[in-house]
Amino acid sequence: MIDKDDRETGADGIEEGKRLVRLGGDKGLSLAQQLAERLYRLTWRTPIHGLRLKGRYPLKLIAVPDDPFLGDLKRGAALLEGIVTVRGESRPIAELNLAKPEFSKSFADYIHSSAWLRDLSSVATRAQAAPIAEQLMRAWLAAHAETVAEPAWRADHWGRRIMAWTAHAPLILSSGDLVYRSLVLNTLARGARHLDRCADKVPLGAPRIAAWCGVISAGLMIPAGDIRRKMGEAGLARAIDMSVFGDGGSVARAPIAQLDIIMLLTTLREAYIARRLEPPARLVETIAAMVPALLGICHGDHGLSSWQGGGPVPGTVIDQVVAATGVRTRALRQARDWGYQRLAAGNSVLIIDAAPPPVARLVEGGCGSTLAFEFSDGAQRLIVNCGGARSVTAIVSPALAEGLRTTAAHSTLVVGDSNSTAIHADGTLGRGVAEVELSRQESDSSSRIEASHDGYARRFGFLHRRQLILSADGRDLRGEDMLLPVGRKRKAAMTPYAVRFHLGAGVEVSPTADGQAALLRLPAGSLWQFRCRGGALAIEDSLWVDGDGRPQPTQQLVVTGEAPAGGANISWALKRAS
């Protein structure tokens, strides 16, 4: 674990030498576990579960907590016009058929989590927003208040919904229709009872934390909730233990999940403040640990880098979230379990994925990104990953979204045109990288990271070792990618490889006459030179998913060659020319 001093000083916490990380990347739910989950969900429709949901319903809420975050202004403006818009998919509110949905999973998640309340309240006064909120609420209640089934009654949706309904109660409870108001409050109470029994059965990570946050929020806002609150606090502590590493990183290893958990816990903290109660120390400590880990994967523009299916959340959003947490801290340079390493010098920031992918059961849409890196010069991104597999707009084809998960969609070495970790169509990851060996050293003149992974050992008989050295002024980045023979098998045939460097949006590429270098001009005007040895350099088309989930056409540098049984060595350098 990383102690408090490490987080505050940015110390590496790794002594010189090598460290081995082991994570099982192919351990999904067993068939027995999948069947047990399905059977449990079927019990929701039984009379016994229906009886469990009955009980006294509140006449009012004890308090109304603040929502500490600003919603999406574009989505909020669309709601004011009577349209629900999610990732390029738009539906008129008046035409929504929630009982027989014909929309995407992302759209359904937006509706069922009641995230639209935050967006709506961010662009309108109470008088303007209340009629729209009531219209959407009536539609949801008519379709799902009495029918206990997924996805509407999924525990993580109920957790988010309870926090949204209580924080935005003035919007959804301003009606003079007493029957409607009673239905809202009664459904809220039934949802809380459902959560009491289901919160511990949802997947680890943000979903389980969301569920327990809902239990605690209900305990704080619904009268006679002290027992529920205490049970929820114990459940949340368990969920945090299993969902957040000691260094503050999410076990899903996805920046989007990291951001989500921080926002959930910060929103829950506001419920305690509304009741004038002290939040549990574990909640406060977790927020304080997660913020520096989040900052550690942000570029010079304060925006997120693209990892594990997430896109580059804009810096304005990150700044607003961090400000809401109240945590003042430095970016975590090195996270031993979270797995991301950060080198920062001058105006340059380099972020590398130096750990195996997340365990299959912890993440949907995981990526084979081990040893990929991103690199930025100030606010300009020079080397990126394509990103966005889980955040693309509806206009992106499923095939392209799946392609964004591949190793080739990341700035790293690819052997035999295959993924370093197997990618399954159901969103999980299979066999591949199981061990990552890491060494990090700092000196007055440079910072150096050397790491290797075994993702290609079983199939091709090679370890991939990558070395990155960033000069103290941030103007010179030198890299070396090595394929090292491993195991007893020696293949006589040559093995093709490609080292890919996906370029940021707007970066202009000009190849040099010798074919071994290229000039890279960033939109702000700065010039970088790329040079390589050990392979043939080519310039190919690529794409980068922006903060709105839209693919932007870009280019990539590709160094190709063939490795004999004895391995191969590819060296390259990025140097700022102006």
Image (cartoon, rainbow, N blue to C red):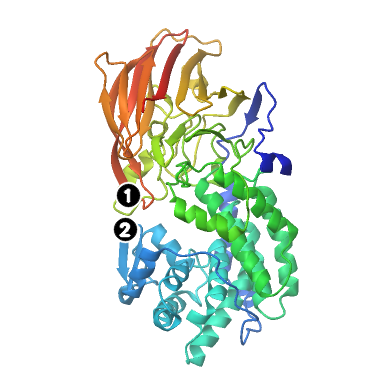
Q: Residue 474, relative to residue 179: is it above or below?
A: above
Q: Which residue is mark 2?
A: 88
- Residue pictured at 37% horizontal, 17% vertical: 532
**CB atoms of marks 1 and 2 within 8 Å:** yes
Q: Nearer the viewer, residue 77 or 494?
A: 77
Residue type for callout 1: Arg
- Give the x, y percent position of residue 80: 35, 74
Q: Nearer the viewer, residue 365 or 27?
A: 365
Q: Which residue is mark 1?
A: 550
Please tell me how many numbered marks the rendered image carries: 2
- Give the x, y percent position of residue 567: 46, 11
| Res. 86 image quadrant | bottom left
Residue type for callout 2: Gly
- Residue pictured at 51% horizontal, 58% vertical: 320
Tell me the element at label 1.
loop
Q: Residue furthest left?
A: 513
